Image (spheres, rainbow, N blue to C red):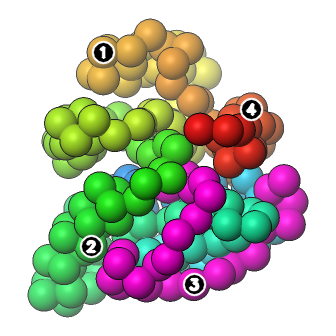
Amino acid sequence: MLNHVQYLISETNPGNLGPSTAEVSFVGRSNVGKSTLLNALCGHVLARVSKTPGRTRMINVFSAGKDRWLVDLPGYGYAVVPKNERREWGPMIEGYLTGRANLRMIFCLIDAKVGPTPLDTQMHEWLISQNLPWRIVATKADQVRSSLAKKQRQDIAHVFGLQPNDIAWVSASKGLGIQELKTEVSRLLTSQK
């Protein structure tokens, strides 16, 4: 299903997006690798990747089939954009996440090497407070030395009250965990709610 994903629309006002049958979204700190992960899941360059944090500035929607969407949200935290524009991201992201009736899952991306930041835990707590579906995905797992990977995964899981196997441990550059996550995303988009 994810092999034929195409760009659909970019929007700053979630109210302008229109309805979908099913959608999943990706949130995380600026520079956590959201665009890189999306490209790996889809098997082709879909989202623009930049070394400059904060390149994603709008709600970017990609179609994975009739009314089935992957949604790339602006990163939170440090970004090389004007402060007034960055301030608008919070309401835009919150408006999207709380206003989508068919949002099946919010994939919360955490840098596996850095671990959860205060902004990551704040986002997680907010998602819980809003009773929204979430899943932790640790990106850039290849950057964690193999001798430390087990402990790092345990530490990340502990912060979120999870078991280590509850964390999707992925590396877009090495392909680690990508097929499993791809299967999960496809299932979420095609299953009946």
Q: Around disc 3, counting alpha carbons within 10 Å, would you say few (fewer than 14), some (14 to 19), or many (20 or more)?
A: few
SS of the residue under disc 3 = strand
Q: Residues within 10 Å of mark 2 (few under 14, many from 20)?
A: some
Above or below, comparing residue 101 to residue 82 in the picture: above
Disc with the residue nearer the chain's start (4 vs 3): 3
Residue topped by disc 3: 9
The kind of secondary structure element at disc 2 is helix
Label 1 near label 3: C-beta < 8 Å?
no
Q: CA gap, disc 3 to disc 1?
A: 35 Å
Residue at numbered disc 2: 92
| Residue visible at 49% across and 77% down in the picture | 18
47 vs 135, left or right, is right
Q: Mark 1 packing: few (<14 Cα in 10 Å), some, or many (20+)?
A: few
Amino acid type, callout 4: Glu
Instruction: Find numbered disc 1 in the image and state the secondary structure of the residue it sits on.
Output: loop
Which residue type carries mark 2? Met
Verify whether residue 159 appears in magenta.
no
- Report whether residue 143 is seen: no
Q: Earlier in the sequence, mark 4 or mark 2?
A: 2
For residue 95, which quarter of the picture?
A: bottom left
Q: Is residue 17 or residue 10 the one in the foreground? A: 17
23 is within the stretch colored magenta: yes
Where residue 2 appears, as percent x and y from the top left, is 80, 56
Distance from the alpha carbon under mark 4 to that under mark 3 = 27 Å
Rendering quarter of residue 131: top left
Query: Residue 70 bears which disc, if any?
Result: none
Select label 4 or label 2 by which is in front: 2
Q: Which residues are magenta?
A: 1-26
Q: Which residue is mark 4?
A: 180
Q: Which mark is residue 161?
A: 1
